[in-house]
Amino acid sequence: MKKLTFLKLCLSTAFVVYLVVAIDFFPFEMHLNLLEWDGTRPAKFVIIFIITIFFCRWVEFEKFFTKKEK
C-alpha cells in the first residue's frame, strides 16, 4: 500500500507538470505527443517536476517517508 501512495503522488504531479510543459501559452500551441518534443521540452519537464515536488508536495512526501510501519 505504501508503494501505491508514493506512485500516486509522483504520477499526479507528473501529469500536472506534463500539461504545463505541453501547452505553450504565447502562440497557444499544444504539443501533447511526447515523441514530437524537441530537446528543450524534456529538460523543462524534469526541472519543473523537481521544483514542484520539492516546493508544492514536500509536506505530502515528508508524511509519506516519516510514516511508521505497524
Image (spheres, helix red, strand yellow):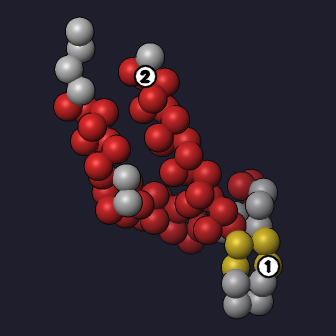
Q: Residues within 10 Å of mark 2 (few under 14, many from 20)?
A: few
Q: Is residue 33 left or right of residue 67?
A: right
Position in image of residue 52 (x %, y %): 41, 60
Would residue 38 appear left or right of 48 to someone viewing this image?
Answer: right
In the displayed image of the protein, which residue is found farthest to the bottom?
26
* CA neighbours of label 1 inside 10 A, class few (<14), some (14 to 19), many (20+): few
Q: Residue furthest top?
A: 70
Q: Residue at x 55, y 50 (%)?
A: 14
- Of badges 2 and 1, nearer the viewer stands 2
Q: Nearer the viewer, residue 63 or 26?
A: 63
Q: Is residue 50 visible?
A: no
Q: Which amino acid, by three-letter code, is at mark 2? A: Lys
What residue did someone put label 1 on? 29
Residue 56's disc number: none
Q: Amino acid at mark 1?
A: Glu
Give me the C-alpha separation between circle 2 and circle 1. 36 Å
SS for dot 2? helix
Q: Earlier in the sequence, mark 2 or mark 1?
A: 2
- Classify mark 1: helix, strand or loop: strand
- Residue at 74% in and 54% down: 35
**x, y percent for residue 66:** 20, 31
Residue 66 sits above or below residue 10 on the image: above
Q: Is residue 1 visible?
A: yes
Q: Is residue 62 left or right of residue 39?
A: left
Residue 47 in picture, x, y percent from top left:
42, 64
Residue sitting nearer the eye, 41 or 66: 66
Q: Which residue ends up furthest to the front in the rendered image? A: 70
Residue placed most toward the observer, 1 or 20: 1
Residue labelled with disc 2: 3
Name the residue rendered at 32%, 42% in the picture.
Answer: 61
